Image: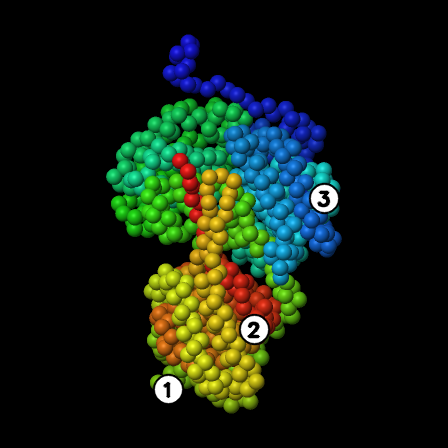
Amino acid sequence: MSILEKMETLEYGPSLEDSKEALAWLDRHARRFGHFIAGRWHESGEVFETTDPSTGETLAAIAQGSAEDVDAAVRAARAALAPWQALTPHARARYLYAMARQVQKHARRLAVLETLDNGKPIRESRDIDIPLVARHFYHHAGWAQLLPRELPGYAPVGVAGQIIPWHFPLLMLAWKIAPALACGNTAVLKPAEFTPLTALAFAEICQEIALPPGVVNIVTGDGRTGEALTAHPGIDKLAFTGSTEVGRAIRNATTKKLSLELGGKSPFIVFDDADLDSAVEGVVDGIWFNQGQVCCAGSRLLVQESILETLTAKLRARMQTLRLGAPLDKAIDMGAIVAPVQLERIQRLVAQGVEEGATCWQPTNPLPARGLYYPPTLLTGVHPASTVAQQEIFGPVLSVLSFRTLHEAVELANNTVYGLAASVWSENINVALDVASRVKAGVVWINGTNFFDAVCGFGGYRESGYGREGGREGLYEYLQPSWLQNAPALPSGASPHSGAAFPGPEQGTPAIDSTIKQYIGGKQARPDSGYSFPVYAADGSLLGEAPLGSRKDIRNAVEAAHKAAGWARTSAHNRAQVLYYLAENMTHREAEIAAALAPVVGEAQAAREVALSIERIFAYAAWADKFDGAVHQPPMRNVTLAMHEPLGVLGIVCPSEAPLLGLLSLVLPAIAMGNRVVAVPSQSYPLIMGVLYPLFDTSDLPAGVINLVAGPPRDLGKTLAGHDDVSAIWYFADPAECETIRRASTGNLKQVFTHDGHAIDWFHAQQGEGEWYLRHATQIKNIWVPYGE
């Protein structure tokens, strides 16, 4: 072939990365690995094989972790915890720094191991994954040094159990181990059974830097190992990255502090003014990067109708040039699918999409003769409700839908149970930022996709999980307020005051006009049950009757809260003004409210509750426009806007020990951040509703922002927890019911915030007020904005 002919075709010859060093490393370990526990290798009776998905060849035999292995690892982590925390911040920083340096030292070998074990192209392992691993350890070495000064009043949670997936094996390890260690925790990590090799190579790095034994423990195995880790009582916090189905099972199996980074069906939105050639390259990076095996892959292409044909034609032309082949070839674009089970899933879902009416197009380039490969795939004519538009495929498959208006684009983008990421393409920055603010996703890239950095938080909304990894916001997943560690246990069962008795309907008293009513949608509403229940003073005398709330009352309250969605769009300043007005109105009725409370809690506590309630209203009015986001500066030509957004509709079950102050301490941070609330008032004094709703009515609070439904906290709490239109549940009543509430809330994976059995002093501002509550009332959206030509 002449030089001219080569210039015409621009075909690449093979350029294989040398795997000699990686294979030699495997051979030095006799291609057999045990668990890494307490700084040493431990053999296990049962083993499984890890294979190269591009060839099917066995790479090594890996230990299958048992419950006994997990227990040994957790005990080692627990034994190492106090000595690790006793080190100075600088000493912990030096260990993390040493990890970063060793990752860089062994970068080439780690990249080759990752590609052999996972099947991803060596260019991605070498140029993206491993540099980001080092970046995370460097970044968190800095946090280890600065933590006492930057985050005073926080303490490590203890022993962290961490379960990571197979699509970014070493990077996911760094995302979890680096912040855990920086915050003073120890860790037990389980890598995915398909891709354990780089985690085991990291264990060797821990030995090389003389990390104290037990600080990092790695136990390999399949789902059985993960189940044992999840169930272990010695784990204080669990972090999981993986599928939504498994995340839901973990959520159902544990009541531990939990962060979940789950699946996605991310929209890739292209407007008619976008740079289409750049958008095409963005699609390539968005869905065919790592063979589409990326939780935030832009698997739904939403195209403005006027450019649909033009963009899809450009896409087909670009797809025709994508090269599939041996992952160690530096000249290929796509490697192998990780495992047969994943390849079968991709094939099955594409076939189902075609059955449902989609048109499938694939380039004509041949696939390699052996190995697990699937071609880049374009599905057009996809209906918004079809399987391929709703289910995560986790493969190189792009579903195309069209839209006409910006509003329709946002509706289509949010037409999913997920909320992990989105990409918006427009040359009009006003349009791009408007869409970014309206899309329900934890990460939004403008005119770009799949950008990651240690300084920027990453995580999802809705059924894509909760919690953040990376940056300052990721540290909170491994910290807790210092006071919480020493807080006494809250007794289970009866209220500290006589309070309410909840009869069955056959014993109840039918509601009459003079009985306190529910407060729903800004109006007093009789309970759907038609019954009320008596409320007693501390001396046993009858104070009055409260409405007996039911499932239908909760349904009506949730509907009313959703109708008040405009509250989230109200400026923080205006929300603050409403709260200040509420405090002003309460001061006018201070003596009256205290007198109403006194028969239940005593005159001294009643007066104190009212005075502190006014002060707390002022505090959250102050916070309303001050608990704002941040601007991150990642090491690329982007700025990242970390914006605090409200969760939506919150269900709040209030504590009994402070009927007024406890309710306001929970409701106020929620509404100050733009949420709407359905609250179940104190069991000891639900009649407090009759005091509060006249205040709400006269303080310019929009109807539906606060809804109050009285009744049995356990029953109403379970109803709120199981309601799919409730975004989060805060449960601060009987600690015996916390586990029940968590399990009831797994349907839509709503966030759960409870006292976890600790007694909270609502009269102490450090415990009953502040950022701890505000963080639980918000979720962070990171919007990546590029700059420059």
Q: Amino acid at mark 3?
A: Leu
Viewer-nearest residue: 618 or 545: 618
Secondary structure state at the residue bearing disc 2:
loop
Report the quarter where the C terminus lies: top left
Q: Is residue 309 left or right of residue 453?
A: left
Q: Residue at x 52, y 51 (%)?
A: 468
Q: Amino acid at mark 2?
A: Trp
Q: Is residue 459 left or right of residue 479?
A: left
Q: Residue at x 52, y 32 (%)?
A: 124
Local packing at callout 2 (Cα closer than 10 Å; few below 14, some 14-19, many 20+) is: some
For mark 3, what is the residue? 211
Whether tag 3 and tag 1 are in contact, CB under 8 A, the answer is: no
Secondary structure state at the residue bearing disc 3:
loop
Viewer-nearest residue: 584 or 707: 584
State the count of labels: 3
For mark 2, what is the residue? 762
Q: Is residue 537 left or right of residue 646?
A: right
Measure the alpha-carbon separation of dots 3 and 1: 69 Å
Local packing at callout 3 (Cα closer than 10 Å; few below 14, some 14-19, many 20+) is: many
Q: Earlier in the sequence, mark 3 or mark 2?
A: 3
Q: Position of residue 180 (x, y in %)?
A: 62, 50
Residue 789 seen in render: yes
- Note whether 305 is above or below 576 in the view shown: above
Residue 354 seen in render: no
Measure the alpha-carbon separation of dots 2 and 1: 32 Å
Q: Position of residue 466 (x, y in %)?
A: 50, 54
For mark 1, what is the residue? 514
